[in-house]
Image: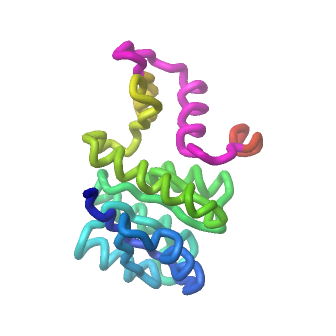
Amino acid sequence: MRPKINILYADDDAVAVELLKRQVGTDDFCVRIASDGQKAWELFQSHVPDILLLDIKMPYLDGLDIIKLVRKINQKTPIVVYSSHLNTTRELEAFNLGADDCICKEIEPDLLIAKLKRIYDRVTKGETDPQIYILSDHSKFNSVAGILTINDKIVRLKPYDSRLLYLLCVKFGELADEDYLIE
């Protein structure tokens, strides 16, 4: 039996919190809730979760502030921005600060669960670098180094190609619209 995935979810919107608890309220997840950014930071320091799920807009510390604080002391814990206030600029800022993914709250519950499990599986299978994306059984992409490995053959991508593949990886299972890719 697979262990429960411990999620620390920071959001000041009680309705969103209740909805997420219902969506992931399965035997696969254990969700701790922080109602503001300061509480999330305190809970993170007392018990590091398997996945840190953050809203962007919160009292005291916003999601981007928490990403900065966490990445100063912990590079391994996956951080997922989970917000209704996402746009290309905010997503890129979150990624540049160290977020591993950005997910819009309007996502279908099954897709949200699949994404969270995929992030957890990537980390627990020895791929502890959140910037490495497993594309298939035979290929992976290191977005920091811009290296694509296919059947143990290393391909160093051009910066533009690397950035495009990275943007597609973070939108796994979602529609990446033209504006997102152009920006």
Left or right side of 109 for 176:
right
Question: What segment carries the magenta color?
Answer: 149-176
Residue 56 lies left or right of residue 79; in this view the side is right
Residue plotted at (57% across, 83% down): 13
Rendered position, 93 above or below 166? below
Q: Looking at the figure, which quarter contains the C terminus?
A: top right
Front position in the image: 78 or 15: 15
Residue 173: say if magenta. Answer: yes
Image quadrant occupied by the N terminus: bottom left
Q: Number of numbered discs present?
A: 0
User: Residue 82, percent across and down?
Assistant: 54, 64
Residue 143 on the magenta span: no
Q: Is residue 65 above or below residue 60?
A: above
Residue 77, image x, y percentages? 32, 56
Q: Residue furthest top?
A: 153
- On the image, the x and y values in percent for residue 87 come to 68, 57
